[in-house]
Image (cartoon, helix red, strand yellow):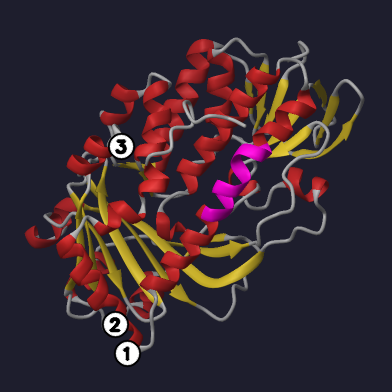
Amino acid sequence: MENKPIIIIGAGISGLTLCLTLLKNGYNTLLFEKESEIDQRGAGINISPNGNAILYNLGLKDKITNLASKPTSVELRTFRKGIIVAKQNLNESCEKFFNYPFLQMQRKDIINILKAEIISIKPGVIFTDHTFESYSEKESSILAYFNNQKTIEGSMIVGCDGINSSVRKIMLPNSEVRFSGIVAWRGLVDLQKLSKSTRELSTTVWMGRNSHFVHYPIKKNKFLNFIGTIKKEKWEDNSWHQVGTKEELQNDFKGWNKTVIEIISNIEKPNKWGLFERSPLPRWISKRAVIIGDASHPMSPSYGQGANAAMEDAIVLFRSIDESKNNTQQALEKFQRNRKRRSDNLQKSSKFNTGLFHLQNPILKLIIYSGLYILGHLIPFILIKSRWVYKYNAFKVKLK
């Protein structure tokens, strides 16, 4: 675009996906990451059919499936007695109805695959140890300023720099995030350390009071990934991520069923995240800058759509650029027009799922759980509810 590079800030999933797509289509692009190594925090992630539609179309099918686990089903269970409230076949149904599978991976695997693919196409476009500080927009270009006194001129800046996005803070200085009142515990457990009954479970969501616990196998069933969320009054740490202790984790899920207790007792070093949220923003763009992924629409992990939505953003932004030729403003407006409503709805649905998994009122629980149980025996309720999410193909959806 205009022969100046598209400057990407942040080498997470959205930034790497965008960089790879642009390079594959002949665009000049540079990617800058503040860390000395590409960030690989986090444990497992869900790649649902809408995400795999992207990865497969980027030519990464074999590399992804060689490392991913493929769950047969998902179960919703009560936290203490383990009663199955709802169960849904996943992959047989996903491939039949949505053309792509539902996969579960270690976050660092997908990061490494994307990074390696970029390097194989054009080495030298990823720069680490570059902390983005500010930008200034001109009539025909934009300048990005970094802490090492480097200034880069480009056609646009794309903020892929996460929930604490520096690009967003410059574009929308009053758009602060707030603690959601929920802390998420994450970790990995060697599956061989667990009992046979636990190893044989597919993806499971244990629903508690103001809390829930999810686990599923990753890395071709070598490890069990878990995420446990629990309501907390406050998050005191300045960082959104920190190392926790097994004792604190055990205390947070004291009294839960034996499967959850077994998983927790076998974790060596749990990590915890403060989950932060922000109401949908009025806009994601300025004249020559745009924010995508968590920088623009952070969402609860309860729908497993954070990474998928970030990849969708990257592809729709690429397509908007491609269709708008040399008109940067037109490209950014097209991107925002085609992504904002869906992303806002994904944020709301993710928050709704958290509320569903955290029900406290026993009467409301009985009513809702009974309804889920009955519906689940009549129709594929979970997939029907998620059809609008999973059927989306960012490469094919018509842009307005």
Label 3 to label 1: alpha-carbon separation: 36 Å
Identify the secondary structure beneath mark 1.
helix
Rendered position, 39 above or below 320: below
Kind of residue sitting beneath label 3: Phe
Whether residue 108 is visible to the viewer of this picture, yes or no, is yes
Which residue is located at x 85 percent, y 28 percent?
Answer: 143
| Amino acid under disc 1 | Ile
Q: Quadrant of residue 385?
A: bottom left
Q: How many marks?
A: 3
| Chief SS of the magenta region | helix
Magenta region: 336-345
In-image side of 279 versus 216 (left or right):
right
Left/right placement of residue 17 relative to residue 365 reads right
Q: CA distance from mark 2 to mark 3?
A: 31 Å
Q: Which residue is mark 1?
A: 363
Q: Is residue 310 shown above or below 121? A: below
The type of residue carrying mark 2 is Ile
Report helix, strand or loop for mark 3. Answer: helix
- SS at mark 2? helix
Which numbered disc, 3 or 1, marks the residue that appears first in the sequence?
3
- In the rendered image, residue 230, in percent from the top left (x then y), is placed at 43, 74
The quadrant of the image that shows the C terminus is: top right
- Residue 50 position, x and y percent, is 40, 38
Residue 367 is tagged as 2
Image marks 3 and 1: residues in contact by CB distance under 8 Å: no
Please say if the residues under marks 1 and 2 sit with CB atoms less than 8 Å apart.
yes
The residue tagged 3 is 98
Is residue 341 found inside the magenta-colored segment of the image? yes
